[in-house]
């Protein structure tokens, strides 16, 4: 009988915080920009420059920690992590090893077996490194320091996850919580949320942990799933072939779906950590913690419970809408403008999700204004436009946020409800389609659908469908 193996997974999740300026200087944290334009002597590591801590970084770190059920170290310090790499201008990174700001937390995720608690070992603050740009054409590497000094928190989990489903549930819970706090946009495609996977395997039932590897360069949920499945298979194959799994850092290449060894086992002493002499310790009062706690928003679970009580919409719709703070905000603001909750939900779950998928967009990229969606629903309810035209207009407001009423007027998109015009058009359609008329009169009632469609085509989609149906039935019978 083949041996059964258990996968043991822990994650180190790096999250870029949504401050306007960097952690130790006043440079912009805005994504993009020409290389090395968001820089100064501090974040490029110039001799004699001194760091000054951004208070907002501490508050965001505390807010995330409290939301993830962590304890707060009320006396916290920064340390220097020494290593030599071109994107690390000081030859050290300012981080936290000995007294991280948050520790001993947890989140609860839903699994097929029910709720499961994933422990959080610690959350610490640190600065990001720069970015190496590899130029294959000129066979060289260039350094962009725009990202150097961007504030990060690193959320280190306990090795409590056992499958890719649990990993993704955990990451989604982290992302939703942090987005609700406004502490980060958590866009994986822009690198503002990144995960390193620590993974080992052991025989099912064994108490001792296997030798772990750490995989880096994971910037999408799909890449994380593929990397975990690949590394699990690689380690099991190694063990069954009589080999030894080495403790090492590996780089995941998602295009080739393969991981490569980067460096062997590293411990804290390899980095020669010591307290940063340029930064004073952070002393956090009970009052400061209370202020942060009092600012907590309504999180997804509480919002979903409220929606179930207040709005007549399906539980599935609730789970999708509340999974994104942006979607939840649009929903609530549109409803507050007088739109029916179910109709707002239908637009978000239908056309919005379709367009996001087609354009490969994240929900955070939605620019749709609630006022425009409310106007569109109102015009449809009044019969000023029909559902076909409404869908066309929705695409315009999704892309450009045009003035709905002006667009309808300027493009003559109002519903045609003039019975004389419709009867004249229907008469022509009936004359041109004798077979469908005969089918209907022979008892094939579905044939009327074709005639309705032809009428709508002639009317360029602007006819009132209910009135077209009514007149057609009168005419055919």
Image: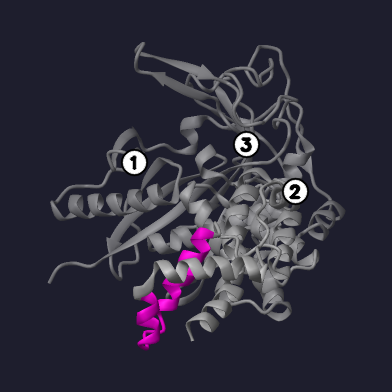
Q: Residue at x 34, y 13 (%)?
A: 139
Q: Position of residue 365 (x, y in %)?
A: 60, 46
Q: Label 2: which residue?
A: 406
How busy is the neighbourhood of tag 1: few (under 14 within 10 Å), some, or many (20 plus)?
Answer: some
Say whether marks 1 and 2 touch (CB < 8 Å): no
Q: Label 3: which residue?
A: 126
Question: Considering the numbered disc 1 on the image, is that residue within a helix, a strand or a loop?
Answer: loop
Range shown magenta? 436-458
Question: Considering the numbered disc 2 on the image, is that residue within a helix, a strand or a loop?
Answer: helix
Q: N-terminal of the two: label 3 or label 1? A: 3
Q: Look at the picture and state if 159 lies above or below 53.
A: below
Q: Main secondary structure of the magenta part?
A: helix
337 sits to left or right of 256:
right
How busy is the neighbourhood of tag 3: few (under 14 within 10 Å), some, or many (20 plus)?
Answer: many
Q: Label 1: which residue?
A: 254
114 sits to left or right of 366:
left
User: Is residue 27 visible in this depiction of the protein?
Assistant: yes
Residue 279 or residue 31, whichever sits in front = 31
Question: Considering the numbered disc 3 on the image, is that residue within a helix, a strand or a loop?
Answer: strand
User: Is residue 72 visible in this depiction of the protein?
Assistant: no
Q: Residue at x 57, y 78 (%)?
A: 471
């Amino acid at each position: 009988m083949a041996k059964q193996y258990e996968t043991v997974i822990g994650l180190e999740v790096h999250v870029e915080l949504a401050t306007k300026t960097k952690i130790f200087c006043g440079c912009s944290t805005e994504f993009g920009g020409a290389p090395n334009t968001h820089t100064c002597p501090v974040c490029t590591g110039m001799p004699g420059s001194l760091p000054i801590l951004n208070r907002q970084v501490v508050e965001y770190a505390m807010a995330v920690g409290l939301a993830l059920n962590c304890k707060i170290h009320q006396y916290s310090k920064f340390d220097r992590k020494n290593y030599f790499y071109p994107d690390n201008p000081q030859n050290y990174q300012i981080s936290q090893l000995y007294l991280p700001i948050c520790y001993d937390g947890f989140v609860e995720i839903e699994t097929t077996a029910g709720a499961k608690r994933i422990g959080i070992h610690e959350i610490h603050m640190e600065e990001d490194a720069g970015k190496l740009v590899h130029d294959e054409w000129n066979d060289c590497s260039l350094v962009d320091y725009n990202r150097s000094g961007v504030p990060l928190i690193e959320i280190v989990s306990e090795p409590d996850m056992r499958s890719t489903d649990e990993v993704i549930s955990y990451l989604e819970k982290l992302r939703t919580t942090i987005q609700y706090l406004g502490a980060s946009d958590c866009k994986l495609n822009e690198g503002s949320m990144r995960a390193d996977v620590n993974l080992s395997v052991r025989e099912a039932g064994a108490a001792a942990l296997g030798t772990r590897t750490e995989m880096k360069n994971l910037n999408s949920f799909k890449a994380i799933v593929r990397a975990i499945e690949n590394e699990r298979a690689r380690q099991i194959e190694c063990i069954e072939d009589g080999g030894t799994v080495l403790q090492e850092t590996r780089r995941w290449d998602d295009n080739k779906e393969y991981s490569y060894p980067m460096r062997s086992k590293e411990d804290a002493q390899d980095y020669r950590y010591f307290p940063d002499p340029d930064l004073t310790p952070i002393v956090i009062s009970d009052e400061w913690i209370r202020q942060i706690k009092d600012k907590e928003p309504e999180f997804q679970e509480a919002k979903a419970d409220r929606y179930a009580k207040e709005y007549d919409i399906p539980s599935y719709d609730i789970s999708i809408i509340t999974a994104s703070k942006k979607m939840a905000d649009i929903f609530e603001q549109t409803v507050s403008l007088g739109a029916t909750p179910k109709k707002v939900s239908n637009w978000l779950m239908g056309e919005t999700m379709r367009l996001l998928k087609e354009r490969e967009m994240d929900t955070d990229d939605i620019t749709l204004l609630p006022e425009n969606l409310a106007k569109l629903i109102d015009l449809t309810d009044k019969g000023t436009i029909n559902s076909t035209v409404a869908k066309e207009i929705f695409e315009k407001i999704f892309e450009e946020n045009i003035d709905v009423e002006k667009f309808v007027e300027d493009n003559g998109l109002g519903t045609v409800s003039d019975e004389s015009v419709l009867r004249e058009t229907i008469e022509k359609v009936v004359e041109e389609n004798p077979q469908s008329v005969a089918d209907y009169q022979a008892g094939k009632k579905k044939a009327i659908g074709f005639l309705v469609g032809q009428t709508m085509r002639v009317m360029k989609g602007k006819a009132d469908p209910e009135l077209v149906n009514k007149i057609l039935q009168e005419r055919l019978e």
